[in-house]
Image (cartoon, coloured by chain):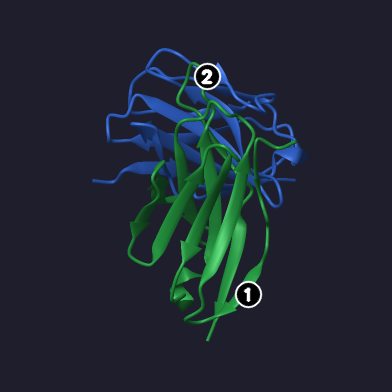
Amino acid sequence: IAGITQAPTSQILAAGRRMTLRCTQDMRHNAMYWYRQDLGLGLRLIHYSNTAGTTGKGEVPDGYSVSRANTDDFPLTLASAVPSQTSVYFCASSDLGVEYFGPGTRLTVT
Amino acid sequence: RKEVEQDPGPFNVPEGATVAFNCTYSNSASQSFFWYRQDCRKEPKLLMSVYSSGNEDGRFTAQLNRASQYISLLIRDSKLSDSATYLCVVNKMDSSYKLIFGSGTRLLVRP
């Protein structure tokens, strides 16, 4: 059982480019989340999805979009990357209130 | 005021020491509480849930004080492998299952 996978592991991206971070889970969890983690700021919620077909905004949604076409996949898209989006991005899914995290994507926007 | 507050540390302790971390939360309606562990450059992983009556898992003991909105984690007989950042986590109590993560307390266990 893989749990949650994320791709890519890391990426260097030029400012202004479009980028999609992929997240897939095989645990059939209904709820999924995207966080960014920056030094000194902890984990901040970007977007979430309570179930397939629905999404919601978290604490820091600007510049990001998500979709949830099915239970397993929850991609995060940066339409036009900016340097302030340099961060480590974690995808998570939850079961009975406990969240399980993917290994993260380290993104650098130059 | 942050919704979940923790002392960032670092706590630097020798092997075998007992160390305690504290956390306060602002939403009195919160019902679920957890401690997560995060190793450097890795994802957070659930360490233990925190129950109203307090609970223990081996060398780890978690306590909840609802009246003071305070959560603690006690680690006995610290091991080098306990070196990590410990995140205090509380549920948000809105229409979704969102969790609020503290910024974490860093623990360094030295030989």
Quarter that holds the N terminus of chain B:
top right
Q: Report the residue at 68% width, 33% height from top.
A: A17
Instruction: Name above or below for residue B99 compared with residue A88.
Output: above
On screen, residue B57 above or below A46: below
Colour given to chain A in the rendered image: blue
Q: Can you tell which quarter of the image residue A86 is in?
A: top right
Q: How far apart are marks 2 and 1 (CA)?
A: 37 Å
Please indicate whether residue B95 sits to the left or right of residue A40 in the image. left
Mark 2 vs 1, N-terminal side: 1
Q: Residue B94 carries which label?
A: 2
Which mark is on residue A76? none
Q: Which chain carries label 1?
A: B
Q: Residue furthest top?
A: A53
> Label 1 sits on what residue type?
Asn
Specify few, some or many for label 2: CA neighbours under 10 Å numbering under 14, 14-19, or 20 or more: few
Q: Is mark 2 on a helix, strand or loop?
A: loop
Which residue is more in the foreground, A72 or A13?
Answer: A72
Which residue is denoted by mark 1 in the rendering? B12
Q: Which residue is drawn at 56% across and 37% down?
A: B67
Task: Indicate whether A99 appears above or below B14.
Answer: above
Q: Which residue is drawn at 43% across and 29% down?
A: A32
Q: Give the residue at x 45% y 26%.
A: B97
Query: Mark 1: which secondary structure?
Result: strand
Q: What residue type is labelled 2?
A: Asp
Residue in front for this viewpoint, B76 or A61: B76
Q: Which chain is green?
A: B
Whole-percent x, y for residue A11 in the image: 59, 47
Q: Do labels 2 and 1 share a chain?
A: yes
Left or right: where does residue A32 sit relative to residue A10? left
